[in-house]
Image (cartoon, rainbow, N blue to C red):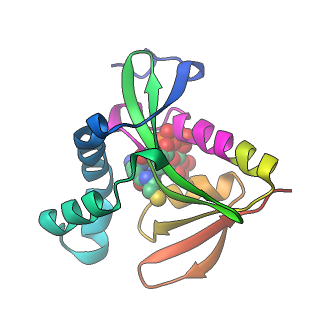
Protein backbone atom coordinates (compact mmCIF):
# COMPACT_ATOMS: atom_id res chain seq x y z
CA UNK A 1 0.00 0.00 0.00
CA UNK A 2 1.59 3.28 -1.05
CA UNK A 3 0.58 6.62 0.37
CA UNK A 4 -1.48 7.56 -2.69
CA UNK A 5 -3.14 4.23 -3.42
CA UNK A 6 -6.31 4.76 -1.46
CA UNK A 7 -9.00 7.32 -1.68
CA UNK A 8 -10.15 8.69 1.67
CA UNK A 9 -13.62 9.33 0.36
CA UNK A 10 -14.04 5.58 -0.07
CA UNK A 11 -13.98 4.79 3.62
CA UNK A 12 -16.98 2.97 5.06
CA UNK A 13 -17.87 2.11 8.65
CA UNK A 14 -19.18 -1.38 9.27
CA UNK A 15 -20.30 -2.79 12.63
CA UNK A 16 -17.73 -5.10 14.19
CA UNK A 17 -18.57 -8.70 15.02
CA UNK A 18 -16.96 -11.33 17.21
CA UNK A 19 -15.01 -12.47 14.13
CA UNK A 20 -13.09 -9.17 14.16
CA UNK A 21 -11.83 -9.63 17.70
CA UNK A 22 -8.27 -10.81 16.91
CA UNK A 23 -7.70 -8.16 14.26
CA UNK A 24 -8.98 -5.48 16.64
CA UNK A 25 -6.64 -6.68 19.37
CA UNK A 26 -3.62 -6.77 17.06
CA UNK A 27 -4.44 -3.30 15.74
CA UNK A 28 -4.81 -1.86 19.23
CA UNK A 29 -1.60 -3.58 20.35
CA UNK A 30 0.38 -2.21 17.41
CA UNK A 31 -1.03 1.29 17.70
CA UNK A 32 -0.94 1.87 21.45
CA UNK A 33 2.02 -0.13 22.69
CA UNK A 34 4.62 2.64 22.17
CA UNK A 35 2.57 5.14 24.18
CA UNK A 36 1.86 2.67 26.98
CA UNK A 37 5.58 1.88 27.18
CA UNK A 38 6.51 5.56 27.19
CA UNK A 39 3.99 6.20 29.97
CA UNK A 40 4.48 3.21 32.26
CA UNK A 41 7.83 1.85 31.01
CA UNK A 42 6.38 -1.54 30.17
CA UNK A 43 3.73 -3.26 28.05
CA UNK A 44 2.17 -6.03 30.14
CA UNK A 45 0.85 -8.31 27.41
CA UNK A 46 -1.35 -10.45 29.69
CA UNK A 47 -2.87 -7.50 31.54
CA UNK A 48 -3.49 -5.60 28.30
CA UNK A 49 -5.11 -8.62 26.66
CA UNK A 50 -7.31 -9.26 29.68
CA UNK A 51 -8.38 -5.63 29.72
CA UNK A 52 -9.15 -5.77 25.99
CA UNK A 53 -11.18 -8.97 26.34
CA UNK A 54 -13.07 -7.73 29.38
CA UNK A 55 -14.10 -4.50 27.68
CA UNK A 56 -14.73 -5.95 24.19
CA UNK A 57 -18.26 -5.04 23.20
CA UNK A 58 -18.77 -5.49 19.44
CA UNK A 59 -21.88 -3.30 19.42
CA UNK A 60 -19.70 -0.30 20.37
CA UNK A 61 -17.13 -0.88 17.64
CA UNK A 62 -17.12 0.06 13.98
CA UNK A 63 -14.42 -1.08 11.59
CA UNK A 64 -13.18 1.59 9.19
CA UNK A 65 -12.80 -0.02 5.79
CA UNK A 66 -11.04 1.46 2.79
CA UNK A 67 -11.71 -0.43 -0.40
CA UNK A 68 -11.66 -4.06 0.63
CA UNK A 69 -9.25 -3.51 3.54
CA UNK A 70 -9.82 -2.99 7.24
CA UNK A 71 -7.93 0.24 7.93
CA UNK A 72 -8.82 0.92 11.54
CA UNK A 73 -11.63 1.07 14.03
CA UNK A 74 -13.54 3.40 16.27
CA UNK A 75 -15.22 2.41 19.52
CA UNK A 76 -17.64 4.70 21.25
CA UNK A 77 -20.64 4.57 23.54
CA UNK A 78 -23.64 6.75 23.00
CA UNK A 79 -24.97 7.60 26.47
CA UNK A 80 -28.02 9.87 26.89
CA UNK A 81 -25.89 12.91 27.71
CA UNK A 82 -22.60 12.26 25.97
CA UNK A 83 -20.73 10.21 23.42
CA UNK A 84 -17.74 8.51 25.00
CA UNK A 85 -15.00 7.83 22.53
CA UNK A 86 -13.02 4.87 23.85
CA UNK A 87 -10.64 4.31 20.97
CA UNK A 88 -9.84 5.34 17.47
CA UNK A 89 -7.10 3.29 15.87
CA UNK A 90 -5.85 3.63 12.33
CA UNK A 91 -3.47 0.89 11.17
CA UNK A 92 0.04 2.31 10.57
CA UNK A 93 -0.04 2.02 6.77
CA UNK A 94 -3.19 4.19 6.68
CA UNK A 95 -2.07 6.82 9.20
CA UNK A 96 -1.43 10.47 8.41
CA UNK A 97 -3.70 10.67 5.37
CA UNK A 98 -6.64 12.37 7.00
CA UNK A 99 -8.61 9.20 7.71
CA UNK A 100 -8.73 9.66 11.51
CA UNK A 101 -9.78 13.29 11.09
CA UNK A 102 -12.55 12.34 8.65
CA UNK A 103 -13.97 9.66 10.96
CA UNK A 104 -13.83 11.96 13.99
CA UNK A 105 -15.62 14.69 12.06
CA UNK A 106 -18.32 12.17 11.20
CA UNK A 107 -18.64 11.39 14.91
CA UNK A 108 -18.90 15.12 15.64
CA UNK A 109 -21.74 15.38 13.12
CA UNK A 110 -23.62 12.66 15.00
CA UNK A 111 -22.95 14.42 18.32
CA UNK A 112 -24.11 17.69 16.82
CA UNK A 113 -27.39 16.15 15.68
CA UNK A 114 -27.93 14.64 19.15
CA UNK A 115 -26.64 17.84 20.76
CA UNK A 116 -24.33 15.98 23.16
CA UNK A 117 -20.64 16.44 23.94
CA UNK A 118 -17.95 13.97 22.86
CA UNK A 119 -15.50 13.03 25.62
CA UNK A 120 -12.29 11.02 25.48
CA UNK A 121 -9.04 10.30 27.28
CA UNK A 122 -5.64 10.41 25.62
CA UNK A 123 -2.23 9.57 27.05
CA UNK A 124 -0.12 12.66 27.61
CA UNK A 125 2.66 11.29 25.40
CA UNK A 126 0.31 10.59 22.49
CA UNK A 127 0.56 13.10 19.62
CA UNK A 128 -3.09 12.37 18.80
CA UNK A 129 -3.87 15.19 21.22
CA UNK A 130 -2.82 17.66 18.51
CA UNK A 131 -5.39 16.21 16.14
CA UNK A 132 -8.14 16.41 18.77
CA UNK A 133 -7.28 20.05 19.48
CA UNK A 134 -7.24 20.89 15.78
CA UNK A 135 -10.84 19.71 15.45
CA UNK A 136 -12.07 21.56 18.50
CA UNK A 137 -11.55 19.34 21.54
CA UNK A 138 -10.45 21.06 24.75
CA UNK A 139 -8.58 19.60 27.72
CA UNK A 140 -10.93 19.44 30.72
CA UNK A 141 -8.73 17.40 33.06
CA UNK A 142 -5.03 16.81 33.28
CA UNK A 143 -3.64 13.81 35.21
CA UNK A 144 -0.12 12.39 35.56
CA UNK A 145 -0.73 10.07 32.62
CA UNK A 146 -3.74 11.33 30.63
CA UNK A 147 -5.66 14.29 29.36
CA UNK A 148 -9.43 14.17 29.41
CA UNK A 149 -10.81 16.11 26.46
CA UNK A 150 -14.24 17.31 25.44
CA UNK A 151 -15.86 18.63 22.29
CA UNK A 152 -19.10 20.55 22.63
CA UNK A 153 -21.68 20.93 19.87
CA UNK A 154 -21.96 24.56 18.83
C1 LIG B 1 -4.42 9.11 16.12
C2 LIG B 1 -4.98 8.54 14.82
C3 LIG B 1 -6.34 7.92 15.05
C4 LIG B 1 -5.13 9.66 13.80
O1 LIG B 1 -5.58 9.15 12.56
P1 LIG B 1 -4.79 9.53 11.22
O2 LIG B 1 -5.60 9.11 10.07
O3 LIG B 1 -3.41 8.97 11.31
O4 LIG B 1 -4.71 11.12 11.39
P2 LIG B 1 -4.89 12.30 10.34
O5 LIG B 1 -4.10 12.00 9.12
O6 LIG B 1 -6.34 12.58 10.16
O7 LIG B 1 -4.26 13.48 11.18
C5 LIG B 1 -2.87 13.48 11.49
C6 LIG B 1 -2.72 13.66 12.98
O8 LIG B 1 -2.96 12.45 13.66
C7 LIG B 1 -2.05 12.31 14.75
N1 LIG B 1 -1.22 11.14 14.48
C8 LIG B 1 -0.68 10.75 13.31
N2 LIG B 1 0.00 9.59 13.46
C9 LIG B 1 -0.11 9.25 14.75
C10 LIG B 1 0.35 8.16 15.53
N3 LIG B 1 1.10 7.16 15.04
N4 LIG B 1 0.02 8.13 16.84
C11 LIG B 1 -0.74 9.10 17.38
N5 LIG B 1 -1.21 10.17 16.69
C12 LIG B 1 -0.89 10.23 15.39
C13 LIG B 1 -1.23 13.59 14.81
O9 LIG B 1 -1.90 14.49 15.68
C14 LIG B 1 -1.29 14.07 13.38
O10 LIG B 1 -1.21 15.45 13.24
P3 LIG B 1 0.15 16.24 13.51
O11 LIG B 1 1.26 15.37 13.06
O12 LIG B 1 0.01 17.50 12.75
O13 LIG B 1 0.12 16.48 14.98
C15 LIG B 1 -4.03 7.46 14.21
O14 LIG B 1 -2.80 8.07 13.85
C16 LIG B 1 -3.76 6.32 15.15
O15 LIG B 1 -4.50 5.37 15.16
N6 LIG B 1 -2.67 6.42 15.93
C17 LIG B 1 -2.26 5.36 16.84
C18 LIG B 1 -3.33 5.05 17.86
C19 LIG B 1 -3.75 6.25 18.68
O16 LIG B 1 -2.91 6.95 19.21
N7 LIG B 1 -5.07 6.44 18.76
C20 LIG B 1 -5.64 7.50 19.56
C21 LIG B 1 -5.78 7.01 20.98
S1 LIG B 1 -6.50 8.24 22.02
Taking depth in this image into account, of 119 and 53 the one nearest to the observer is 53
Q: Residue at x 30, y 40 (%)?
A: 18
Is the stretch drawn in magenta largely helix, strand or loop? helix
**In the figure, is residue 74 to the left or right of 135?**
left
Number of dots carrying numbers: 0
**In the figure, is residue 61 to the left or right of 105?**
left
**In the figure, is residue 121 to the left or right of 154?**
left
Q: Is residue 82 visible?
A: yes
Q: Residue at x 39, y 16 (%)?
A: 68
> Which quadrant of the figure has residue 24?
top left
Q: Tell whether position 105 is magenta.
A: yes
Taking depth in this image into account, of 24 and 43 the one nearest to the observer is 24
Residue extending farthest left = 46
Q: Position of residue 11 (x, y in %)?
A: 53, 24
Q: Is residue 117 above or below residue 13?
A: below
Q: Is residue 42 above or below residue 64?
A: below
Q: Quadrant of the N terminus?
A: top left
Q: Residue at x 60, y 81 (%)?
A: 141
Residue extending farthest bottom = 144
Q: Position of residue 50 (x, y in %)?
A: 20, 64
Q: Is residue 127 visible?
A: no
Q: Residue at x 48, y 66 (%)?
A: 122
Q: Quadrant of the C terminus?
A: bottom right
| The residue stretch that appears in magenta | 89-107
**In the figure, is residue 47 to the left or right of 137?**
left
> Which quadrant of the figure has residue 65?
top left
Q: Position of residue 79 (x, y in %)?
A: 63, 62
Q: Position of residue 53 (x, y in %)?
A: 26, 58
Q: Tell whether position 101 is magenta.
A: yes
Taking depth in this image into account, of 32 and 117 the one nearest to the observer is 117
Amino acid sequence: MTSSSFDLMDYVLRPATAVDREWLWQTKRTCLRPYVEQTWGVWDEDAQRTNFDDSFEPSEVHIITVGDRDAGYISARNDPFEIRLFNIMIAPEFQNHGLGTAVLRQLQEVAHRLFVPVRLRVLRVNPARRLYERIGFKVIEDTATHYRMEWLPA
